[in-house]
Image (cartoon, rainbow, N blue to C red):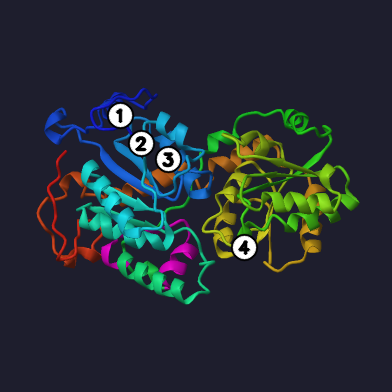
Amino acid sequence: MPCPRGATETVQVADKQTMLETMTGVRPSPSDQSAGKKRPLYALHVFASLDRGGAETWLMDVMRHLGDHSLRIDVCVIKENRGAYEDEFERLGGRVHRCPLGRNVLSFNRRFRDLLARENYDVVHSHLYYFSGLVLRAAAKAGVAIRVAHNHPVEDLKNERATRRLYTWLMMRWMRAFGTHFVGPTRASLEAMLGPDWNRDSNKRIIYNGIRVERFLEPVDRNEIRRELGLPESAKIVLNVGRFVPHKRQGILVDVAERVRAERPDVYFVLIGAGPLRDEVQARVRQKGLEEGFRFVAGLPSIDPYWLSADVFAFPSCNEGFGIVIAEAAAAGLPVVACDIPGVREAAAACPTIELLPVDAPPAAWSDMILRFLNSPRPSDADRRTMLRKFPFTIEASMKALMALYEPSGYSVNDYPSEYRGSEALTLPNRCCFPPWVRRREYRR
């Protein structure tokens, strides 16, 4: 939990500056800092929760990469449950603000604006899909200079209702009115939100979900994972990683496994993740009598040994903004079988071996491709290291793009004026911009 004003909290933090802020809850003003030293930039990322997911995993890699960087990141979550990443996030020096949405949006809006008034963030970076409209509107009223809508999905899975269409219309109107920047992890995600002409405006850009490739350079004992899972050392592993939710479609892998194991009984399917449909998938496995061929693994702090011990990655998801697990599978040197959808198609650029199947491809097509890859030789460690030296989706590239978003060249957050800048600045991403009726408050750092 975030540290109250005037209280102390014992956590392991990245540096002395972060320790001071964490213990006191007060950030230094520019005059308190040494001459010539640029003050940190404070960003608040807004998520539903800090559980394991593509965007959340990316943010955690950003936090692990920060070190003594001038960027400071906190998170606001709108769900009450404590997320799987929260403990590590706080150890890395970040603070988690819990602002439950509940059923009263007006009450949430008031609590969120109170949080912004108390903390004085330079950036509010929302990952809440259409609800980002309300978040950015509140941030504008609170005088936050940089307001980012970060869209991840490529399809609205709830858009069949009339009330949903009214909601999305209003949220998009607010996003366009109050957002200063629009970001997506792929071209597809930006086009889905903003239309095919999104790239005509300089305040709309791609930030790919980078990963720490050094994770995949460590040697691993492939047999150790097999022993942990109760598998023979000669077993072949087909891996799937993702939450058990409808669009991830893990259920199709039960039918695929039935076909694959009929031809190769030495093949085992390892599914890593949690979610509301996990019990349903497990029930289907039992119904088909395939318990011996499946292993279900709950979310773990690190699944890198599983990546490096598997033989094929199968990913039947039908809705992905980027599919960070595709990049991780590529870094591990795994051949990938996935659905041919726009977000995955862009992530596939990192994969030396990948087969993209139509979303409606039958289980037979999946099993045929998996068997073909299982019969192909694995890339050598030397080849994989060579590939990683040119890997396109690194956390370093993500950090560079993120800082270019927050502090464009020649115009840093330290230059943001405290006086009102008119609404004409809305199309200029390098400047603070507030609609005419928004009263700009002074920075109090």
Q: Which residues are magenta?
A: 176-196
Residue 356 part of the magenta segment: no
Q: Quadrant of the C terminus?
A: top left
Mark 3 or 1, nearer chain start? 1
Label at residue 22: 1
| Local SS, label 2 | loop
Q: Which residue bears the numbered disc 4?
A: 318
Q: Are marks 1 and 2 in contact (CB under 8 Å)?
A: yes
**Cα distance, mark 1 to mark 2?**
8 Å
Q: Amino acid at mark 4?
A: Cys
Left or right of 182? Residue 365 is right
Left or right of 87? Residue 71 is left
| Local SS, label 3 | helix
Q: Are marks 4 and 3 in contact (CB under 8 Å)?
A: no
Label at residue 62: 3
**x 39%, y 61%: residue:** 131
* On screen, residue 171 above or below 404: below
| Local SS, label 4 | loop
Q: Position of residue 231 (x, y in %)?
A: 81, 34
